[in-house]
Image (cartoon, helix red, strand yellow):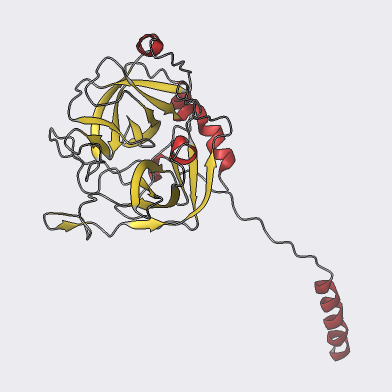
């Protein structure tokens, strides 16, 4: 028996060194399912444009460094999983010369507050500033003022963000039903930091929300015909029933549809009329449903 054991040991050793080990590829990033996303809307009923603390926890702010060294938030985005946000392509490829994107802020509510944001005795976790690993702009996007087609981009962080009550992803329209549904007349919500009349062109301190309605294409085409702007099916046109002190949110912000208990990202703020009071010209958003395949193909 002793001799048999001694014979088996070298045989097992030879068998083990004959194996070739390959590094396993990192798992591809995935998008969350409905029970994992789109939860973060207050059930408090109040007639205000101000969002509540902890509402819409997927909202992101893109931070830029200007040539004078000052930092500025000029575009928004939507967190879609632990590593990526969606934003407008022109927030990356159309920025002023010598501006540089330096990071993405998550979990923010009130920019005027340097400490933790609070609502009475309830205080949020501190915001999180994420470093950037990769900027992914849609290959067919151009910054021509009369198109802004394919105005969509991904920003990949250098690490996963940790989810909390104040940082969570929004759902994307992954199902065939959501991707092909007729959205004309749909009541939707926009959320993000906005340039307002009272802020004199600066973005608002607090993220704001607006109730909007998606228009049919003929109405939109008519409105933009005089501007010689041609729209595509990959864009959504949205009217604001009550224009006033709140303009459309900064580019890259979230246009959302309620489906069951979850909110879905159906549009990305692209462009609109200058000023806040032109109710005859609608705002234009990138139609996220048209780009789900592109989004998934670019995620690592």
Q: Residue at x 21, y 31 (%)?
A: 246
Relative side of 156 to 17, left or right: left
Whether residue 234 sits left or right of residue 185 in the image: it is: right
- The N terminus: image quadrant: bottom right
Q: Identify which residue, 101 or 108, lies in the foreground.
A: 101
Q: Position of residue 75 (x, y in %)?
A: 37, 41
Whether residue 108 is visible to the viewer of this picture, yes or no, is yes
User: Residue 59, can we see it?
Assistant: no
Residue 84 drawn above or below residue 162? above
Rendered location of residue 230, percent (x, y): 46, 15
Apparent side of residue 245 relative to residue 216 in the rendered image (left or right): left
Viewer-proximal residue among 90 and 207 = 90
Q: Is residue 213 above or below residue 90?
A: above
In front here: 74 or 119? Answer: 74
**Residue 256 or residue 209, whichever sits in front:** 209
Q: Is residue 171 above or below residue 144?
A: below
Q: Residue at x 26, y 26 (%)?
A: 275
Where residue 296 appears, x then y in whole percent?
55, 39
């Amino acid at each position: 028996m002793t001799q048999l054991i001694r014979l088996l040991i070298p045989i097992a050793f030879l068998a083990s060194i004959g194996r070739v080990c390959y590094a396993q590829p990192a798992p591809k990033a995935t998008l969350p399912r409905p029970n994992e996303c789109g939860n973060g809307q207050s059930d408090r009923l109040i007639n205000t444009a101000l969002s509540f603390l902890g509402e819409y926890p997927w909202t992101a702010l893109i931070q830029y460094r200007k040539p004078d060294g000052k930092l500025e938030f000029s575009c928004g985005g939507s967190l879609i999983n632990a590593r990526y946000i969606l934003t407008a392509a022109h927030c990356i490829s159309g920025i002023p010369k010598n501006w540089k994107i330096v990071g993405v802020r998550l979990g923010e509510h009130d920019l005027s507050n340097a400490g933790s944001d609070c609502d009475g005795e309830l205080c949020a976790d501190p915001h999180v500033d994420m470093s950037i690993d990769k900027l992914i702009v849609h290959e067919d996007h151009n910054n021509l003022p009369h198109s802004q087609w394919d105005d969509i981009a991904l920003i990949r962080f250098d690490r996963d963000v940790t989810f909390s009550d104040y940082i969570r992803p929004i759902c994307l329209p992954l199902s065939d039903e959501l991707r092909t549904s007729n959205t004309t007349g749909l009541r939707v919500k926009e959320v993000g930091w906005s340039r307002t009349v009272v802020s004199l062109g600066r973005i608002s301190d607090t993220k704001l929300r607006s109730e909007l309605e998606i228009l049919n294409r003929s109405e939109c085409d008519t409105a933009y015909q005089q501007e010689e702007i041609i729209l595509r099916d990959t864009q959504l046109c949205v009217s604001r029933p009550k224009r006033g002190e709140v303009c459309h949110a900064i580019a890259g912000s979230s246009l959302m549809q309620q489906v069951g208990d979850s909110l879905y990202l159906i549009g990305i703020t692209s462009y609109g009329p200058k000023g806040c009071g032109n109710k005859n010209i609608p705002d234009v958003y990138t139609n996220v449903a048209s780009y789900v395949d592109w989004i998934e193909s670019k995620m690592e």
